[in-house]
Image (cartoon, rainbow, N blue to C red):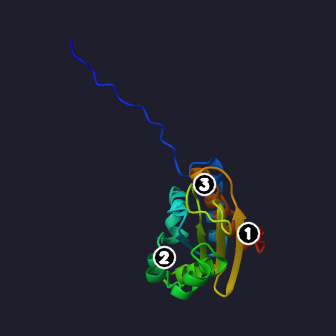
Amino acid sequence: MKMRRARKKTARTAIVSAPESGLLARQVGEALTQHGMTLVTAESCTGGGVAQMVTRISGSSAWFDRGFVTYSNTSKEEVLGVSPETLEQYGAVSEATVREMADGALQYSRAQVALAVSGIAGPAGGTPEKPVGTVWFAWATGDNVQTACHQLSGDRDAIRAKAVQISLQGVINLLNGIIKTA
């Protein structure tokens, strides 16, 4: 008699799988195509989740230039040119940092539209001033930079998924000239 090894079943949780994100990514592509522009992403807490959503769409190379995943402060400095002074004074999760991330993403790409996101997805890392769920966003086209801070709830995956959705919606809003701030 052969003995079978029991396989442990594990639930695989997709970091970004919400149908809303897929729809938003398609809308981003349509809006960028209408405007004849391309997108670059500078992501920290989402870990490339925005880039993942847009590259799931066939033909996205026509409107998505590249994505930077800069999780550590050192990578933000080295890859995007974020000032060490900004990181020291304001921290990685700040308006100043996402502004510099978006600027650096535009500078080091061929895109005309950038989005940047940096936050605290948890469960650790929060402080009284910046609790878990604090996420800063920036959307930029040249000299026009719009920012927003959101306090998101849920577990790590939920916070990251919501941050991806907000990032994508922000691109649409920027291109439509309607930035909604928190």
Quadrant hosting residue 134:
bottom right
Residue type marked 2? Asn
Q: Residue furthest left?
A: 1
**Residue at the disc numbered 3:** 161
Foreground residue among 146 and 149:
149
Q: Residue 56: which numbered mark, if any?
A: none
For numbered disc 3, what is the local secondary structure?
helix
| Residue depicted at 50% across the width and 62% down the height | 47
Furthest-top residue in this view: 1
Q: Residue at x 76, y 72 (%)?
A: 179
**Label 1: few (<14), some (14–19) or many (≥20) C-alpha neighbours in 10 Å:** some
Label number found at residue 73: 2
- The residue mark sitting in front, 1 or 3, is 3
> Residue 19, how many percent across, how many down?
63, 48
Q: Amino acid at mark 3?
A: Ala
The tag earlier along the polypeptide, 3 or 2, is: 2
**Up/down of 34 relative to 57, above or below:** below
Q: What residue would you read off at disc 1?
A: 173
1 or 2: tag closer to the N-terminus: 2
Q: Position of residue 114 (x, y in %)?
A: 59, 76
What is the CA distance from the residue labelled 1 to the residue labelled 2?
Answer: 28 Å
Q: How many marks?
A: 3
Q: What residue type is disc 1 on?
A: Asn
**Mark 1 residue element:** helix
The residue drawn where x is 66% and y is 60% is: 27
Task: Classify mark 2: residues with Cα within 10 Å, few (<14), some (14-19) or many (20+).
Answer: some
Q: Position of residue 182 (x, y in %)?
A: 77, 67
Q: Earlier in the sequence, mark 1 or mark 3?
A: 3
* CA separation in Å, label 1 and label 3: 18 Å
Picture quadrant of residue 120: bottom right
Q: Are marks 1 and 2 in contact (CB under 8 Å)?
A: no
